[in-house]
Amino acid sequence: MVAPELNAPEDGSQDDEPVDSAGRLADPALRLAVELRAVDLAKARYEELGFDVRVLGKPFDLLCTPTPRCADGSPVIHVEVKGSTSAATSVHLTRNEISDARQEGKTWRSDLFIARKIELRAISAGAWAGHGGDVECIEDWHPEDKDLEATDYVYRVPRKLT
């Protein structure tokens, strides 16, 4: 689903939060709060446009089906949602997320929805909630090779024949 990334909020409230090597929040409770806030913002946007919205998570985050309240000719939309506590000038994507957006002959539109600068607030011991967030939606999203950077590879270790 959503891949929240960390750059600590300017108020310093998360300065001591461990970050994994990919720059993502290491605490699962914080990650979940960012994910839920980003999905809530995206869902609200598409519902406001008149779509019926189902939260899937995989192979993409939201399935938006047009209803009679939508503009004429509105397509089905697959939405990939990304959330971040930072300015999110880049986001992490999986191979499947890119494949869905690039699929040849697809009958849907792909959108990339980014929720930036989500604030995290403790609501109880170990539980967090996301608030606010600046949003950007890239409609009819087609990720191009020039905009992608490989950050991870899987190496298959050759087996020796005995």
Image (cartoon, rainbow, N blue to C red):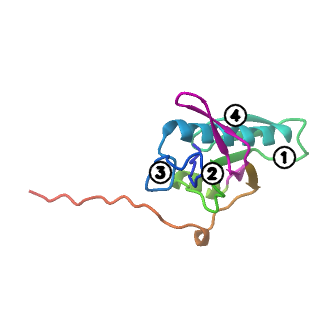
Using residue 139 as the reference point, say whether residue 129 is left or right of it.
left
Q: Is residue 122 magenta?
A: yes
Disc 3 designates what residue? 19
Mark 3 and mark 1 residues within 8 Å of each other at the beta carbon: no
Amino acid on which the number 2 mark rests in the picture: Pro
Using residue 4 as the reference point, say whether residue 150 is left or right of it.
left
Instruction: Of the two numbered discs 3 and 1 on the same chain, state the one appearing first in sequence.
Output: 3
- Extreme residue toward the bottom, this view: 146
| Helix, strand or loop under label 2 | loop
Marks 3 and 2, how far apart at CA: 13 Å
Mark 2 and mark 4 residues within 8 Å of each other at the beta carbon: no
Amino acid on which the number 3 mark rests in the picture: Val
Q: Locate residue 23, reporting x and y percent.
A: 50, 55
Q: Is most of the magenta stretch helix, strand or loop?
A: strand
Instruction: Of the two numbered discs 3 and 2 on the same chain, state the one appearing first in sequence.
Output: 2
Disc 1 designates what residue? 74
Q: In this view of the protein, can residue 15 be seen by the observer?
A: yes
Crowd tier of the residue under label 3, counting other residues whose Cα lies within 10 Å: few below 14, some 14–19, many 20 or above: some
Q: Is residue 125 magenta?
A: yes
- Residue 9's mark? 2
Marks 2 and 1, how far apart at CA: 37 Å
